[in-house]
């Protein structure tokens, strides 16, 4: 099985750097599956779970915003935050989800904090989903 290099990088650290067989990401124009020898490609990524296949096994990575770039046999995800399933603190994500839900229940829709709370909720739900995929 041919492979390609996948690097997942945040402003803090390199979260993942391995040879993988496939990457599936929700890009701006829909889900995109990337196999080795894919044509060059750049897209923004929203809060999403990126699916990675390595050694025949699939796992999810929680990403909150950034970019995916495919160039040669290298896929780079530059993300605001990125966590592997085993690195996610589920209690923390559950607490963030509850906080966000409370804020959303209190606020009016036009309030700027409403958007922030919605994003916080999306991030927490994404993290819980990825943590539970183990
Ligand atoms: P919280 O409200 O719980 O602080 P947050 O969504 O505000 O979460 P971020 O600003 O997205 O947190 O991330 C800050 C840092 O904390 C990043 O390094 C991110 O990877 C990490 N992080 C956030 N939530 C979790 C979690 N549930 N488990 C592990 N790491 C997390």
Image: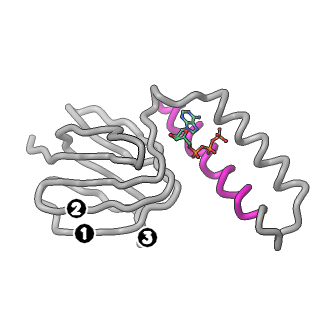
Percent across and percent down for residue 94 are 69, 34
Crowding around mark 1 (Cα neighbors within 10 Å: few <14, some 14 to 19, many 20+) is: few
Which element type, helix, strand or loop, lies under badge 1? strand
Q: Which is more toward the observer, 40 or 81?
A: 81
Question: Are discs 3 and 2 less than 8 Å apart at CB?
Answer: no
Percent across and percent down for residue 50 are 40, 48
Determine which of the numbered discs, if any, sits on residue 116 in the image.
Answer: none
Residue range corresponding to the magenta coloring? 114-134
Residue occupied by mark 2: 70
Which element type, helix, strand or loop, lies under badge 3? loop
User: Is tag 1's residue or tag 2's residue first in the polypeptide sequence?
Assistant: 1
Q: Which is more toward the observer, 81 or 125?
A: 81
Q: Which residue is rendered at x = 33% and y = 62% of the image?
A: 32
Percent across and percent down for residue 70 are 22, 61
Some atom of ligand 1 lies within 8 Å of the CB belonging to the residue at label 3: no
Q: Main secondary structure of the magenta part?
A: helix
Residue occupied by mark 1: 41
Residue occupied by mark 3: 28
Q: Which residue is rendered at x = 49% and y = 52% of the image?
A: 48
């Amino acid at each position: 099985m041919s492979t390609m290099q996948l690097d997942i990088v945040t402003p803090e650290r390199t979260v993942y750097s391995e040879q993988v067989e496939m990457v599936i990401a929700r890009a701006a124009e829909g889900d995109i599956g990337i196999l080795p020898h894919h044509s060059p490609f750049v897209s923004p990524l929203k809060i999403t779970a990126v699916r990675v296949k390595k050694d025949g096994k699939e796992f999810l990575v929680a990403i909150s915003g950034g970019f995916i770039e495919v160039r040669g046999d290298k896929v780079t995800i530059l993300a605001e935050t990125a966590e592997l399933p085993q690195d996610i603190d589920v209690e923390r994500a559950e607490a963030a989800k509850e906080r966000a839900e409370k804020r959303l229940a209190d606020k009016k829709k036009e309030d700027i904090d409403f958007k922030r709370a919605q994003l916080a909720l999306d991030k927490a739900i994404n993290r819980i989903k990825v943590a539970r995929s183990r």
